[in-house]
Amino acid sequence: MPPGRKNSVSLILDAPAASATQTLFGLNHQQLTSLVQEFSVPEYRARQLSDALYRQWVEDLDEVSTWPKSLRESLDAAGYRVGRPRIVEAFRSVDGTERYLIASSDGQTVETVWMPEGDDGEEGDGSEAQNDFHRATICVSSQIGCAVNCQFCLTAKLGIVRNLAAGEIAGQVVSVLKRQKFEVGKQRINLVFMGMGEPFLNYDEFMAAVRLLVEEVGISESRMTVSTSGIVPGILRFAQEKTRPKLAISLNAPNDAIRSGIMPITRKWKINEVIEAVRQVPLRPKEKITFEYVLLGGVNDRVSDADEVVRLARKANLPLKVNLIVWNPGPGMDFHMSDAETVAKFQQRLRSSGIPAYIRRPRGRDIYAACGQLKRMTELTTLAQ
Ligand code: SF4
């Protein structure tokens, strides 16, 4: 548990899953069909297995009740395991946010966050029909660590450890839904791929996870948002996808000069190139592109910066909105938070110029709920012991 956080609750749950020789969770219907064919059983067994993995959320082959014991034993003997990542530690904030360390079979952990009342990120994006946008949101990781090296982000300090497989990405969602006793189809959920990692640097596995979540778990892609730091080739591929989440660009600066200082990726792809790529994404009716903007005191939060964002947005001429995020401090980062008055002025400047701008409320501050904070703090705590 992070030190000095009296109101947080830490719960040790399961041990990491034992290393599985062959993991079933993450296989799509076609792959499961090929698998059951190897065992010389009819195709409908693949559908039963898919239901068990993605609708009933079983954790062990023994729980696949629609299968005869002999078939379960055959798979087990061949080294197959469900292999879904497991929640190994949970931190509960006073505001209801829960943050988890979720372990893969190799013991590596990522962070996943459950926000019972949403994160306000969906506000104003055209999806808040019936004004019910305050619904639960899960923030999902796509890589262990990250190579993008945004200067304000604690995940960057971990470096890149490895990509997550599709089953490890979708498995975070299923593990959290199961813990929350969530009923897909009866309750609404938002997924934001804004946790650890840059999804578009793990494009194939990320999109395979999206398809699993849509086709097998049953969550609509219109309830999902992916955030990218501006990986242009990834955005161009994304533009070709039939099934895709909504798109958010982690902008964080009004021009390339400021952005290069806090997001070195800007030296590879300039803001204009990113926006040009975003233009290729065919938007659904009412869909908006989100510009995420982390406010850093004295760096990018001046009124003149807001005015430049307005000019940028007008030039982009896209249906868009801006999410203003108040930066969460962390160890080893030489920034400071924007004060409330500065944040309000920045928002007002955008709004008065006709740019929809929303302030994302900080969640779970007492449990290090900003990207990478929990894993990094856990590592620092471990090192200090
Ligand atoms: S903000 Fe996102 S893209 Fe940037 S270093 Fe952190 S995890 Fe990577």
Image (tube, rainbow, N blue to C red):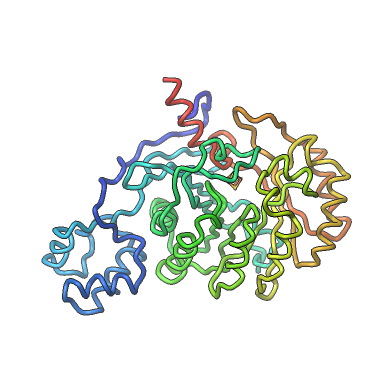
Answer yes or no: is residue 362 visible: yes
Residue farthest to the left, as pictured? 70
Residue 185 makes an appearance in the image: no
Depth order, front residue of 187/305: 305
Ligand 1 in which quarter:
top right
Q: Which quarter shows the C terminus?
A: top left
Tell me if residue 49 comes above or below residue 273 in the rendering.
Answer: below
**Depicted 111 relative to depicted 358: above or below:** above
Task: Quadrant for the N terminus, please.
Answer: top left
Q: How many marks?
A: 0
Counting from the top left corner in percent of width and height, residue 168 is at: 40, 54
Towards the viewer: 175 or 107? 107
- At x 19%, y 69%, the residue is 67
- Residue drawn at 73 percent across, 54 percent down: 270
Residue shown at 85%/50% (left/top)? 348
Left or right relative to 341: residue 242 = left
Q: Position of residue 129 (x, y in %)?
A: 65, 68
Question: Residue 94: horizontal and vertical position, in percent?
Answer: 55, 37
Q: Is residue 91 above or below residue 310?
A: above
Residue 306 location, x and y as percent? 84, 48
Task: Residue at the far front: name it.
Answer: 268
Which residue corresponds to the image point at 67% horizontal and 51% vertical from the top-left? 268
Q: Quadrant of residue 124?
A: bottom right
Residue 28 located left or right of residue 64: right
